Image (spheres, rainbow, N blue to C red):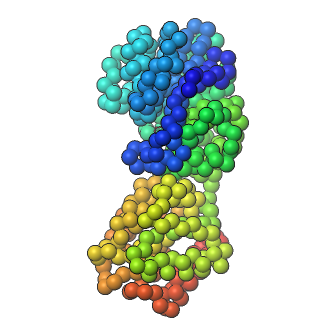
Amino acid sequence: MNKRQIKENIYWLGAIDWDRRLFDSLIPLPDGTSYNAYLVRGSEKTALLDTMDPPMADKLLGQLEEIPKIDYLVSHHAEQDHSGTIPNVLEKYPEAKLVVTKKAKTMLMDLLHIAEDRFVTVEDGETLSLGNKTLKFIHTPWVHWPETMVTYLEEDRILFSCDFFGSHIATSDLYVIDRGRVYEAAKRYFAEIMMPFRSVISKNLEKLKDYNIDMIAPSHGQIYDDPAWITEAYHDWVNGPPHNLAVIPYVSMHGSTRQMVDHFTAALAEKGVRVELFNLAVTDIGKLAMSLVDAATIVLGVPTVLAGPHPAAAYAAFLANALRPKTKYLSIIGSYGWGGKTVETLSGMIGNLKAEVIDPVLCKGLPAQETFRALDELAETIAEKHKAL
Ligand code: FEO
């Protein structure tokens, strides 16, 4: 892909990673991703905002071939999918200064061994003139690491947001065309990397509210040329109350836990509670993370293996604990063969979740009528609690 003009003297540079299916050896990328950088040419100075993942270095250098001078290279975020090609750019442009937050400076020195004399650090709210264009740097920690910032291009009212508002989608579209698709991908992205930091992200959203923003240009996915809807979505994900939704991640070995899950799902639905099921043996954890953004309740369906929880359920508990969703109620249902410490083990894994734990329903072997009655009661308790949300 060649560089593409967004506005006069402002260009998208980037690489579309159509084939990538995993990020950080953890996060599924069902639709690939893109790494976006941006070039801003002022009347006196030229700035490049972010770079690309190291395997894409040749693409960026090819797009810069006809650019004789870069005065400033702005790095919003030290993670290597955006910073990894900084050394190549600094080598090509020996006069260029690397513009970062103080925290990013130490991180980039650690991660990429960049020489200290290449850096210029900027404070929150500081501006940098390119002549007829002005970059304003706004510190926005935890989108997605502690050092992150965004840049507001004052004259053109463009927010360059890096991971903030990003989405992992590989497409040739420069701008958002299919809002439904981008909403889902952006929500998945928020859930996987920003949800644990909701209180800080809420402050970041508050910081941006007085800026007139015509366009948001993230470093993954498409540019928002009508950005109000994505900022409203973020407000809902970050500040909105949990929804009338019970998420049930479960795993079943011989069908007993599955019978409990099916009965419980029907009971919840009859009482007006929306339910999303995730079979942990086959599920995409990104989908599960996305559901956790809204869920008022999580009920883990878990059989006992070797005296403890099935490892797939333990993984889901660990993930939920790391992502810290705004869930208000938690419980466990499942079957065991002869005993064990499934509930105690899982309870010890969810210390980050500030949720009320509702008594679990466990049964020995195949569920019988008393177990189904207990599941009905659990469903009733959850439905009543959801009415008060
Ligand atoms: Fe797209 Fe946190 O890097």
Tell me the residue at 28%/75% (across/down): 306
Residue ranking furthest to the bottom: 369
Quadrant of the rendering where the N terminus is positioned:
top right
Tell whether 143 sits left or right of 271.
left
Nearer to the camera, 36 or 194: 36
- Quarter holding the C terminus is bottom right
- Give percent across and percent down for residue 337: 34, 83
Camera sees residue 358: yes
Image coordinates for residue 173, horizontal then vertical, percent: 64, 34
Residue 184 or 146: which is nearer the viewer? 184
Residue 7 picture quarter? top right
Q: Say above or below: 22 vs 78.
A: below
Residue 164 visible in the snapshot: no
Q: Residue at the spot x=64%, y=12% of the render?
A: 132
Residue 341 placed where, x, y %?
Answer: 31, 76
Position above or below: 242 against 71: below
